[in-house]
């Protein structure tokens, strides 16, 4: 519904992110009577886990690439039956408190990149941040060669584009024809690409199993940690039996396809002149330092690599939400039992509160939806209701498992030993490990921000999403070692054009009714 003063749409709740958490939160709140806007960068809802091919690709059975697909179709049906306004293709770049009325302004851009871009503002009484996560990358010599992709990225290529890494682009746009090599999702793919899957975390097993089922050859899954960390928590495992079933399912698929699992090992070098031809896999000690002389070459066409996930917190930290450190050292949002952040009126669910998987994200989204509906309806927190109690118990059980998982796959401090000085760490700005080490040892940089100011690492297009974790670790290796207590604050969550920023200050000035500020801005003296 439009706001009479500004003509901008105004809702009870703006949900940012239409993955498992955002979808569950949006439909729950709408079913309880709230007006809800659901914004997402992507063209279709589903987030990372329920990513699926665009209809034009003609996949006949997209569910074949997923387990738990019925959860998504259930959420999609509830979304279609609800009054939720889905704003797809909307990139939210900031959320700010409105000048008046205790509202929040959610600023996004939509439309084609460049001249076709259009600013959009959505005003809401409450905001649910469900922005998910991105992959943690730790660089190594050769990681910028064509054919090296993120592990989650490989999964995303398969789920949304029906393409396998190492095979080039498969003719997936066509409907599968009789006699063609057709994967179970209906993708047509050329057989035979050899993809090594490496890094750390349970995602590797899921990715390797999907790639193998879709027709790739997977010579090895290379896990930098071991799995013993899980065995130390039998009670947590026992109450999360579904996770064991999931692991067994992936393990069986890997056995069936003859995939070898190598633990306590890492890809420490990629070989090839203009694309991946082989990788060196080295054994690691407890701190992830490569064991000298243990390197073995594996011939392959592609490498899918990732070291777990890191919550996407730019919007939250821009708002001043408090974070805490998870067991793997990453920053996650500090949330109360109702999923509210430290900033009243801003809730969060899913990976933003710590990496825990799609089922946990659904539960937290629903809990947040219940809590927000109660708050905006002037009712007490719903903690006492049977539904909220059951959800709360499931959340706590799955969060306990998430903590065990984060600890089991926490990056060891010795990973930087596989970097040589010539390796680019920030690939956008082409900043090498040597230059970062120089900034730390010669110029006294102690955190990623100072390294950025000295070297431009993290200043490029991806805004540190690729190199941020690695730069922070390298910065912490200096004397007086300390990891930063809070994540770096970036006022813009996605790149925006200067004219969008200028329009924002003009609107703010006219809404505040400050003629001097408006005049100063018109004359270009308004700071
Ligand atoms: C690359 C990748 C691959 C993964 N693959 C698997 C897998 O194979 N198996 C598995 O079990 N788990 C996988 N996961 C983890 C799984 O996706 C999550 O556990 C689950 O999706 C969490 O749901 P969520 O709603 O918290 O986040 P997500 O599903 O990630 O949803 C977040 C949504 O927020 C949107 N968003 C973020 N920022 C903005 C913004 N500024 N403006 C607008 N929209 C925004 C994103 O477009 C996205 O749709 C993967 C994660 C990643 C990052």
Image (cartoon, grey):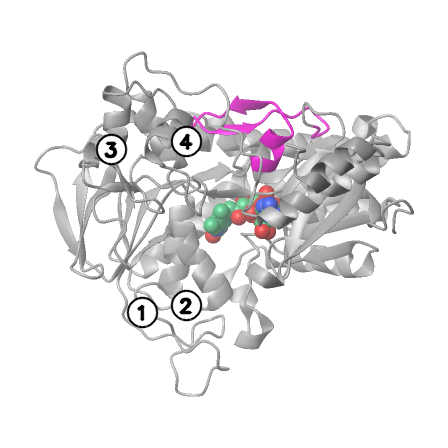
In what element is the residue under mark 2?
Answer: loop
Are the two marked residues, 1 and 3, in contact with CB atoms closer than 8 angstroms? no
Determine the CA span between mark 4 and mark 1: 35 Å
In what element is the residue under mark 1?
Answer: loop
Determine the CA span between mark 2 and mark 4: 33 Å
Question: Which of the numbered marks, if any, corresponds to residue 163?
Answer: 2
Residue 139, above or below 37: above
Determine the CA span between mark 1 and mark 2: 8 Å
* Image depth: mark 1 or mark 3 in front: 3
At a point 51% along the width and 33% down the height, the residue shown is: 402
User: Which portion, as a residue range, is magenta?
Assistant: 314-340
Q: Is residue 418 left or right of residue 330?
A: left
Work out whether mark 1 precedes mark 3 in sequence or the reverse, and give the earlier one: 1
Work out whether mark 4 precedes mark 1 in sequence or the reverse, and give the earlier one: 1
In what element is the residue under mark 3?
Answer: helix
Are the two marked residues, 4 and 1, in contact with CB atoms closer than 8 angstroms? no
At a point 21% along the width and 60% down the height, the residue shown is: 300
Does residue 304 belong to the magenta stretch? no
**Residue closest to the eye, 490 or 264:** 490
Q: Is residue 403 left or right of residue 214?
A: right
* x and y, in percent, of residue 67 in the image: 54, 56
Does residue 315 belong to the magenta stretch? yes
Mark 3 neighbour density, 10 Å: few (under 14) some (14–19) many (20 or more): many
Residue identifier under label 4: 230
Determine the CA span between mark 4 and mark 3: 38 Å
Say if residue 366 shows up in the picture: no
**Residue closest to the eye, 418 or 499:** 499
Q: Is residue 377 left or right of residue 346?
A: right
Determine the CA span between mark 3 and mark 2: 36 Å
Question: Which of the numbered marks, if any, corresponds to residue 435?
Answer: 3
* Image depth: mark 4 or mark 3 in front: 3
């Amino acid at each position: 519904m439009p706001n009479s003063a500004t003509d901008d749409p105004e809702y009870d709740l703006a949900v940012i992110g239409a993955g498992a958490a955002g979808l569950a939160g949006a439909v729950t709140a709408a079913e309880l009577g709230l007006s809800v806007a659901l914004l997402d960068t992507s063209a279709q809802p589903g987030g990372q886990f329920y990513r699926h091919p665009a209809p034009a690709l003609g996949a006949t059975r997209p569910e074949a690439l997923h387990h738990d697909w019925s959860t998504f179709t259930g959420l999609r049906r509830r979304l279609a039956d609800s009054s939720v306004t889905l704003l797809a293709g909307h990139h939210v770049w900031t959320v700010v408190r409105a000048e008046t009325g205790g509202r929040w302004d959610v600023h996004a851009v939509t439309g084609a990149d460049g001249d076709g871009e259009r600013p959009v503002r959505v005003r809401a009484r409450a905001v649910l941040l469900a922005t998910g996560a991105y992959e943690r990358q730790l660089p190594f010599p050769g990681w910028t060669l064509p054919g090296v992709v993120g592990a989650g990225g490989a999964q995303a290529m398969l789920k949304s584009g029906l393409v396998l890494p190492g095979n080039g682009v498969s003719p997936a746009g066509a409907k599968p024809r009789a006699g063609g090599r057709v994967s179970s999702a209906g993708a047509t793919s050329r057989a035979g690409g050899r993809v090594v899957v490496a890094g750390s975390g349970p995602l590797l097993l899921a990715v390797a199993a999907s790639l193998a089922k879709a027709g790739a050859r997977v010579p090895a899954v290379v896990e930098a940690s071991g799995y013993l960390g899980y065995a130390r928590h039998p009670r947590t495992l026992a109450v999360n039996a579904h996770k064991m079933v999931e692991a067994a399912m992936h393990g069986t698929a890997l056995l069936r396809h003859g995939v070898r699992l190598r633990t306590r090992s890492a890809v420490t070098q990629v070989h090839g002149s203009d694309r991946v031809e082989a990788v060196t896999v080295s054994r690691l000690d407890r701190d992830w330092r490569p064991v000298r002389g243990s390197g073995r070459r594996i011939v392959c066409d592609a490498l899918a690599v990732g070291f777990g996930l890191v919550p996407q917190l730019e919007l939250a930290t821009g708002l001043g939400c408090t974070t805490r450190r998870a067991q793997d050292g990453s920053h996650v949002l500090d949330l109360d039992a109702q999923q509210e952040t430290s900033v009243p009126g801003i809730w969060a669910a899913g990976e933003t509160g710590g990496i825990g998987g799609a089922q946990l994200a659904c539960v937290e989204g629903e809990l947040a939806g219940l809590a927000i509906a109660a708050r905006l309806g002037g009712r007490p927190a719903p903690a006492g209701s049977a539904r909220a109690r059951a959800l709360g118990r499931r959340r706590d059980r799955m969060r306990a498992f998430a903590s065990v998982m984060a600890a089991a796959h926490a990056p060891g401090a010795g990973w930087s030993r596989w970097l040589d000085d010539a390796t680019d760490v920030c690939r956008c700005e082409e900043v090498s490990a040597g230059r970062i080490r120089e900034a730390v040892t010669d110029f006294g940089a102690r955190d990623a921000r100072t390294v950025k100011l000295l070297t431009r690492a993290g200043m490029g297009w991806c805004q540190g999403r690729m190199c941020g974790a690695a730069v922070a670790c390298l910065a912490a290796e200096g004397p007086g070692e300390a990891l930063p207590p809070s994540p770096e604050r970036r006022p813009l969550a996605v790149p925006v054009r200067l004219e969008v920023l200028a329009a924002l200050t003009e609107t703010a000035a006219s809404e505040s009714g400050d003629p001097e500020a408006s005049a100063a801005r018109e004359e270009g003296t308004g700071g």
